[in-house]
Image (cartoon, rainbow, N blue to C red):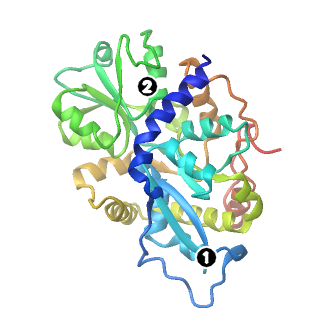
């Protein structure tokens, strides 16, 4: 069976659990009314839309969406069109929601975006902007692992088979000259696919020796006594790599470009505010996480996690292409044709209006 089909089967199984958990309220947890998202007097609906449905994860690497929602940036730009929200735990469930029309625009990692685009033969989505870089670390039990070479023979968690961190870890393992079967996770290192929500408990129980995970999970493990052995950013040129993109349904992009422009304008404004006001932005993101999950992050988790993430409008397209190559090398993806996965036309328009430089699609843009 082709590797791409094996990956799709594995992703479908992995996606089933979050989908079941979300079944009572559609694909994601529905938004509550936002006190900060007041509609200005006299505001009009954009394109006559009653709402624009925005999806994101409860991760700090989705901080643009968290802050954009909590501070009301999205609602401000959408006017009388309601900004509604859904939160997700895994990329496949968000892609399914996008494909079904349950959401219109989403914040998501590069691997789910690549998989969603290739599985639909380039017809389902477009990446329309960047959001964040970094925020991924290899954290380990310092009593069992004292150096990178000690990772061999240990049990290391990643969030999901074929997800962005899983691909990165498998590529790193291969770079050490070690062998691991990508599907089973067995080999010179045992790769344990574990939901980020339960990974800290798995670490505390001793069932894993470490994890290659995004924030805030990495810092949660550090708070449990783990140490950071490797920051993934150190493996990339200029220490930058895409961790979060903005995607849109192609039909929505075609039918409602003004609404897409409003969301992208809000995203750019949110990133400017985040970078100009890091402490306030960190607090705003944590407040939204608390509203979404019922629990805020403690300072010993929030502070180091936030520092490791760079918020940027640049989609860092060349690094997405490299990540796709890593997935192919790992046997998790047939060589994809990513030409046209980006449509940065509206983002560049927004950036130009705000006095910023356009961004590069690395040859993968819409012609």
Instruction: Give me the residue at 53% from left, 19% from top.
Output: 330
| Front in this rendered view, residue 129 or 119 | 119
Q: Quadrant of the N terminus?
A: top right
Pick out the residue farthest to the bottom. 41
Indicate which disc residue 41 carries.
none
Question: Residue at 56% across / 51% down in the picture?
Answer: 97
Q: Is residue 35 left or right of residue 38?
A: left
Using the image as rendered, state which of residue 301 and residue 115 is in the foreground.
Answer: 115
Q: How many marks?
A: 2
Q: Position of residue 78 (x, y in %)?
A: 61, 74
Q: Looking at the image, which residue is at 30% across and 47% down?
A: 304
- Viewer can see residue 235: no
| Local secondary structure at mark 1 | loop
The image quarter containing residue 363 is top right
- Residue 364 at x, y percent in the picture: 73, 38
Rendering quarter of residue 317: top right
The answer to whether 200 is drawn above or below residue 45 in the figure is: above
Find numbered disc 2 in the image and state the secondary structure of the residue it sits on: helix
Pointer 1: what residue?
Answer: 81
Question: In the rendered view, would you say 219 is above or below 352?
Answer: above
In this rendering, would 147 be left or right of 11?
left
What residue is pinned by disc 2? 169
Rendered image quadrant of residue 146:
top left
Judged by depth in the image, the label closer to the viewer, 1 or 2, is: 1
Q: Say which of 33 and 21 sits in front.
A: 21
Q: Could you say where residue 15 lies in the image, as x and y percent from the top left?
A: 46, 39
Residue 262 locus on image (x, y percent): 65, 68
Q: CA distance from mark 1 to mark 2?
A: 41 Å
């Amino acid at each position: 069976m082709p590797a791409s089909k094996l990956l799709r089967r594995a992703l479908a199984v992995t996606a089933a659990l979050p989908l079941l958990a979300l079944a009572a309220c559609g694909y994601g947890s529905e938004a509550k009314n936002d006190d900060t998202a007041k509609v200005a007097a006299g505001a009009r609906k954009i394109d006559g839309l009653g709402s624009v449905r925005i999806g994101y994860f409860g991760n700090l690497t989705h901080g643009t969406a968290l802050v954009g929602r909590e501070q009301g940036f999205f609602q401000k730009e959408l006017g009388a069109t309601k900004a509604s929200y859904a939160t997700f735990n895994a990329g496949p469930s968000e892609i399914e929601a996008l494909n079904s029309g349950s959401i219109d625009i989403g914040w998501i990692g590069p691997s789910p975006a690549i998989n969603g685009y290739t599985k639909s033969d380039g017809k389902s989505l477009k990446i329309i902007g960047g959001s964040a870089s970094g925020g991924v670390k290899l954290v380990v039990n310092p009593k069992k692992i004292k150096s990178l070479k000690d990772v061999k023979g240990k049990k290391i968690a990643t969030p999901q088979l074929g997800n962005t961190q899983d691909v990165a870890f498998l590529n790193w393992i291969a770079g050490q000259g070690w062998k691991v079967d990508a599907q089973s996770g067995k080999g010179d290192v045992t790769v344990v696919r574990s939901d980020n929500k339960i990974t800290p408990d798995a670490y505390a129980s001793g069932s894993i020796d470490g994890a290659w995970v995004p924030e805030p999970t990495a810092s949660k493990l550090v708070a449990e006594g783990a140490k950071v052995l490797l920051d993934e950013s150190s493996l990339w040129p200029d220490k930058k790599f895409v961790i979060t993109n903005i995607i849109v349904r192609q039909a929505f992009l075609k039918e409602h470009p003004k609404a897409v422009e409003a969301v992208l304008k809000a995203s750019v404004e949110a990133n400017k505010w985040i970078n100009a006001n890091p402490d306030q932005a960190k607090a705003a993101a944590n407040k939204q996480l608390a509203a979404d999950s019922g629990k805020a992050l403690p300072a010993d988790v929030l502070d180091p996690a936030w520092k490791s993430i760079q918020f940027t409008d640049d989609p860092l397209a060349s690094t997405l292409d490299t990540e796709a190559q890593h997935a192919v090398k790992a046997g998790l993806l047939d060589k994809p044709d990513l030409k046209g996965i980006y449509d940065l036309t509206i983002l560049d328009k927004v950036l130009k209006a705000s006095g910023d430089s356009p961004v590069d699609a690395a040859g993968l843009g819409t012609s």
